[in-house]
Image (cartoon, rainbow, N blue to C red):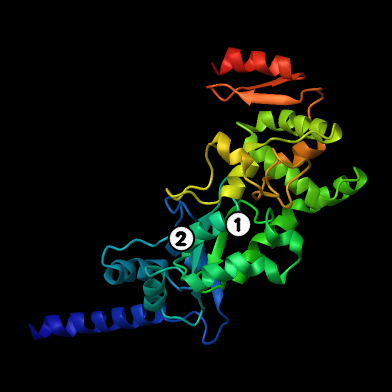
Amino acid sequence: MKLLLQIFLPIIFLFGIAVWFLGGPPQMKSEQEIFTVPQVTRDMDIPGVLQEKGFIRNVMVFDVLLPLISHGEEVKPGGFYLTKSMWAWQVAAKIIGKPDLMWVTVNGCQRREEIGNFLARALGWDQRKLDEWNGAYKSMQPEYGEGVYYPDTYLIPVEESGTEVAKRFINRFNEKFAPYVTKFQDANIRWPTALKIASLIEREAGSASDMPVIAAVIWNRLDKNMALQIDATMQYTRGQKSDGSWWGSIDLSEKQNESPYNTYLHKGLPPTPICSPSLASIDAVLHPAETDCLFYLHDATRVIHCAATYQEHLKNIKAYLQ
């Protein structure tokens, strides 16, 4: 027994020293950095990336520590604030906890309050942060009230204020929209006007292929000083429904409600965009279809049919909707 202790104690001691050394901090002092875990973690070698980026010294030691600390919890997608002066066990404990930055994906052309409600659920906002988001435009340019909260995937710090998150979305919009600034200037179209039209296109389109047709109808109606008569503007006026949704069919009676967004009662464009459009609908504003159509509808399979006259439109209604 004594002989066994004499043999194994030095081995255990040396193993402990190795684990202590290899599990120690790679640097004595370092700045905080963001370690990003993608939305789909299946193909990511997390220990390997941690070592590659200099957050841990040894993958094998980390592979031993992580299961001991995680107790079966998996590393969640998101961003984690790490330093290279952290011990391996500290890194492991950090990345199996709640992320410091959360992945958020906004799809479709949504209005500002609608996006705000989604962010509040995704990021765990309280009412104060939601109010900051909804009121952020008041301290910015009036054009930033609606339509500039670009739909995309964001990695957002959980502790960021609602105002800061709003600026993050607006900065992404400015980045994406930059190539179009000169194009709209050359076409003598103000960018807020372009966003208004793009938002109408996207809310009305059944697919991206519809967008140039709807853009042409809107331009044709504006050129003829006709009321746009677009239901989506009335949906914007109505706001959130009792079931929590923001968009949906409009009753005939609602089309008589007074509102600057009522494009049945008022000619021209609404005061602001009604949602934040994608580049596809923005591009359609510049490149409408070559057609003299003034009316359109979607059939039951969401295929668009347009008409140059009201009589033709009535025929389309009879053929595709009745």
Residue 322 horizontal/vertical position (percent):
54, 16
Which label lies toward us, 1 or 2? 1
Badge 1 is on which residue? 112
- Dot 1 amino acid type: Arg
Q: Quadrant of residue 220?
A: top right
Of the image marks 1 and 2, the number of the one nearer the N terminus? 1
Residue under numbered circle 2 = 122
Residue 93 located left or right of residue 291:
left
* Foreground pick, 306 / 156: 306
Residue found at x 54% / y 54%: 114
How many neighbours does mark 1 have within 10 angstroms: few (below 14), some (14-19), or many (20 or more)? many
Q: Are marks 1 and 2 in contact (CB under 8 Å)?
A: no
Q: Is residue 307 left or right of residue 243?
A: right
Amino acid residing under circle 2: Ala
Q: Residue at x 61, y 18 (%)?
A: 317
Seen in the picture, residue 312 relative to 102 is either above or below; the reply is above
Q: Position of residue 224 (x, y in %)?
A: 85, 31
Give the CA distance from mark 1 to mark 2: 15 Å
